[in-house]
Amino acid sequence: MVRQDPPAFLDAVRWDERGLVPAIAQDARTGQVLMMAWMNREALAATVAEGIAVYWSRSRRRLWRKGESSGHTQQVREVRLDCDGDTVLLSVEQHGGIACHTGRTRCFFQRLDDGGWVIDEPVVRAPETIYGAGNGHE
């Protein structure tokens, strides 16, 4: 088996002490921020190679391809790195219109209002119909 060197663009990223970088997924059409997740070197390399969002699950301690259990994949249109090199921005086409494991369009559905958090976006599809009774956090 031939060993391939990792892509050079990975060296420009400022990985944290755990080898992770925050990755923000933004709707390519509307500009709406859909979610934030973590990537390690392998996840970012796979995202670029496959053209779909691949993240690092801190709870499962493994790579996860967004939509692997829900079918709500993120087709990557563009990858950007911020000025400090410590945050990745993915411009994505969100398939199925649901980015959040709660069944909502995006993960940022709570708004601070008068000192308290208000849920101001509806559930598009009940999580149990997407993941089953276990409501698998994607």
Image (cartoon, rainbow, N blue to C red):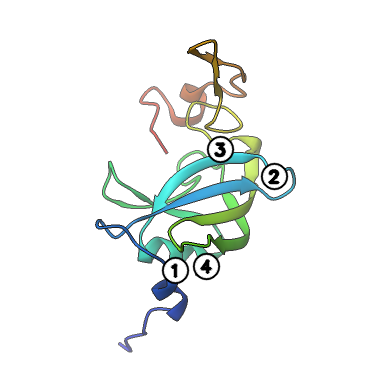
Q: Secondary structure beneath disc 2?
A: loop
- Quadrant in which residue 103 is drawn: top right
* Marks 4 and 2, the one that precedes in the sequence: 2
Residue 100 on image: x %, y %: 52, 33
The residue type indicated by label 1 comes to Ala
Label 3: few (<14), some (14–19) or many (≥20) C-alpha neighbours in 10 Å: many
Name the residue carrying label 2.
31
Q: Are marks 4 and 1 in contact (CB under 8 Å)?
A: yes
Task: Tell me: residue 8, above or below residue 116.
Answer: below
* Marks 1 and 3, the one that precedes in the sequence: 1
Res 99 label:
3
Residue 98 on image: x %, y %: 59, 35
Task: Tell me: residue 55, above or below residue 5.
Answer: above
- Horizontally, residue 62 falls left or right of residue 102, namely left
* Residue closest to the eye, 112 or 94: 112
Res 111 label:
none
Q: Secondary structure beneath disc 4?
A: helix
